[in-house]
Image: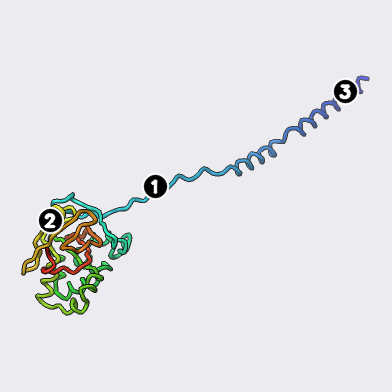
Amino acid sequence: MVKLRGVAGAGIAAVAVLALTACNPDDAAYSGKAEQYKSATPPAPAPASAPVSTVSTPAPGEGGSGGSAVFGSACESLPHGSEAGSVTAMGQQTVAAAAAANPLLTKLSAAIRNANLTDSLNNAPAVTVFAPSDDAVKAYGETKFSQLKGTELTSLLNFHVIGKRLDAKGLEAAKTSPTLATDGGQLTFSGTGNQLTVNGAKILCGNIATKNATVFVIDKVLAPASGS
C-alpha cells in the first residue's frame, strides 16, 4: 500500500508539471515573442531638420543701414551657392571681375574690356555700379552699343558709376548723385525698396556686394539725356 501511494503521488506531480508547462511558455519562446513585439514597434520619427535659411550677402552702404540683402526678380537667374557668377562668389571679387562672371552682364563686361576700364574699376576703393543687363543692351541696340569707341564709350560707361559705395537704402537717402562721367551728368533715385529706380530704370537685381563695389543690375542703358 505504501508503494502504491508513492506511485500515485508521483503521477499527480507529473500531471501538475505538464499542466504548468502547457500554460506557460518556456523562457526561449517568451523571449522570441518579446523580440517580435519589439521589432514590430515602429521607430520613433526622426526629428525634423532645421529650416534652411537664405544667406544674403550684405552690401556696405553709406547713409543706409550698413548692409542689405540682394533683391529683384533677376537674382534667381544667377548661379547658386559658390559657383562662378553667384552672389557669394562675386562677393570675393573686385567689381569688373565679378561682372565678367555674371551671366546677366556679358555685353557690359565686353564693353568694359573694350574701353580699358577693367583696372580702374577693380582698383577703385569704393563705387556703386548700375549695370545694364544683356537684355537692356539689346533694347538699346546691340550694334549701336558695340560701335561705341574711345571717349564716347568710356563716358557712357562712367555714367553708370558713382564714386561712393551705397546700398539701396543709401540711394533712397541720397536721392541724387553725380557720376564719374567726365562730361558730367547726374543720377536720380526714386521710389523705395524693390520699387527703387535709377533715372527711370528698374532694378533687376540689386545690392550685389563685391570687394570694392555695390552692383545694381538694371533694365536700361543710361545716358545723360535720359536723366531727370
Determine which residue is flagged by label 1: 50
- What SS does tag 2 mark? loop
Residue 180 placement, left or right of 71: left
In the image, 46 versus 182, the foreground residue is: 182
User: Mark 3: which amino acid?
Assistant: Gly
Q: Give the x, y percent position of residue 44.
A: 52, 42
Residue 90 placement, left or right of 50: left
Characterize the local packing of mark 2: few (<14), some (14-19) or many (20 or more) Cα atoms within 10 angstroms: few
User: Mark 1: which amino acid?
Assistant: Ala
- What SS does tag 1 mark? loop
Determine which residue is flagged by label 2: 175
Characterize the local packing of mark 3: few (<14), some (14-19) or many (20 or more) Cα atoms within 10 angstroms: few
User: Mark 2: which amino acid?
Assistant: Lys
- What SS does tag 3 mark? helix
Which label lies toward us, 3 or 1?
A: 1
- Mark yes or no: residue 73 visible: yes
Contact between marks 3 and 1 (CB within 8 A): the answer is no
Determine which residue is flagged by label 3: 6
